[in-house]
Amino acid sequence: MTRACSQAELEAYLDEALPAELMARIEQALRNDRNLVRQLAAINARRDAGVHSLGEIWRRHRLTCATREQLGSYLLGALSKEAADYLTFHLEVVGCRVCQANLADLRKQQAESHDAAQTRRRKYFQSSAGYLRREK
Amino acid sequence: MTPASQSDLLLVQRVRSGEADAWEELIARFEGRLLAFVEHRTRNRAAAEDVVQETFVGFLTSLPNYDARRSLESYLFSIAAHKLTDHLRREGRRPALPLAAPSGTNPSSWEPQGPVRPASSIVRSGERRHLEESALVAALGEQIAAYQRRGDWQKVACVELLLVRGWANKDAAARLGLSEQQVANIKFEFLAKIRAAVRRQGLPEDVFPELYEDPQ
C-alpha cells in the first residue's frame, strides 16, 4: 500500500465499510504483510475486551449519514450549497459506502426499467418467502 | 442507536405476523440500495444478486432476534456486509484472519496506551456495553448537531476525518485548507465536550481510550 492504514480504517475494513478501492488494497496487502494481519487480530481482541472506538460508533450509528430524502434533494440540487458541499465530502472523501449505495440506487431508479426491477424483486421474494413465519 | 422510522416499524410488525405483501414491500423498499452496496465490491451483477438474496433470507431467519428499536436499513446493511464478506472469502479475495491476537502476542500491543486501566481487566455485561455505547452516541450526536445548527460544516468534516477515517492532523489540515494548529484545536474542543458528557453520565473512562489521547 502507498501509505499505512490508520487504526480507524482497519476497523472499517473489518466491517466492510471502507471505499471499495481501499478494501481491495488491504486485501492484497494482507497476503504478504504479517504485521497487518496482527494489527487486525489485535483490533478484534480489543473489541472482544469491550473497548469502544469513537469512529466505529460514529460509523455504526451513521451519525453524519444523509437520509434518503436528503440524498434525493442532493440529486435535484435542492440542498443549500454548504449542506451539499458537506454531503459531497461525506460521499467522496470519507467514502461512506451506505450513502454511496443509496445515491446509486436513487440514480438507477430514474434510469432502470420497471420490468427489470420487478423481475429481480420477484426472484428475491420467491427464494425467501419460505422462511416467512408468523411469530408466536 | 439510530432509530427505526415509524413506517419501517409497521412494516416489520406486518412481516412478523407473516404477511407476504409486507415482505414483498420490504424487498421492494431495500433491494436496490443493497444491490448497489454489494455490486460496488463484487463488480459482478449475478454474484451481487445472490448476496442480496442471502441477505433477505438472513433477515428472515434472524428476525426473532431483531431489536425493532434499531434502524431497519442499518440492520439490513450489516447483514449484507456479513454475507458479502463470506462471499469474498469463498472467492478467495478476502483472506481469513485469526479469531484473536496470535499466541505469543503481548497484550500490551493492543490495549490502549496511557495511564488508563487496561479494558481487558474490566468484565462488563453486554447490556452495560450497550448502555456505554448509547451514551456515547448521544454525546457525539449532540455535538455534531450543534455544529450543524451553526452551519459549522468544516468542523464536522474535520472531526469526521480524524475519528472515522483516522487521518493524521496534518493530512486533515491539508485536505480542509486549515492549519495543523486549527485542526488540533477543533479536536481538543470536540473531545473535551465528549469527555464532559461521559463524566456527567458517570461512565468509566477507561473504555473510551481515544478520549484521553494527546490531541496533537
Image: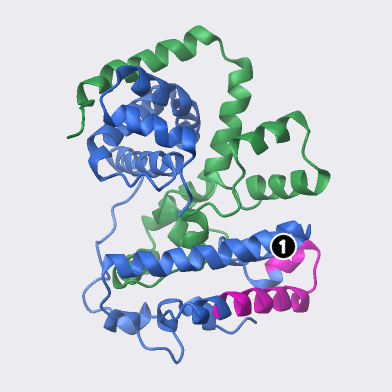
Chain colours: A green, B blue
Q: Is residue A27 visible?
A: yes
Q: Position of residue B39 (x, y in %)?
A: 46, 31
Queried whether the magenta region covers residue B208, the answer comes back as no
The one of A77 and B194 positioned closer to us in this rendering: B194
Given the image, on which type of amino acid does mark 1 rest? Tyr
Q: Residue furthest top?
A: A115
- Magenta extent: B171-195
Question: What SS does tag 1 mark?
Answer: helix
Left or right of B8? Residue B186 is right
Say which residue label 1 marks.
B147
Say which quadrant the C terminus of chain B sits in: bottom right
* Residue in the picture at 78% in, 34% down: A78
Left or right of B198? Residue A128 is left
The one of A30 and B46 positioned closer to us in this rendering: B46
Q: Position of residue B162 (x, y in %)?
A: 61, 67
* Residue in the picture at 54% in, 82% down: B213
Q: Position of residue B112 (x, y in %)?
A: 42, 81
* Residue in the picture at 72% in, 62% down: B147
Q: Is residue B51 above or below residue B174?
A: above
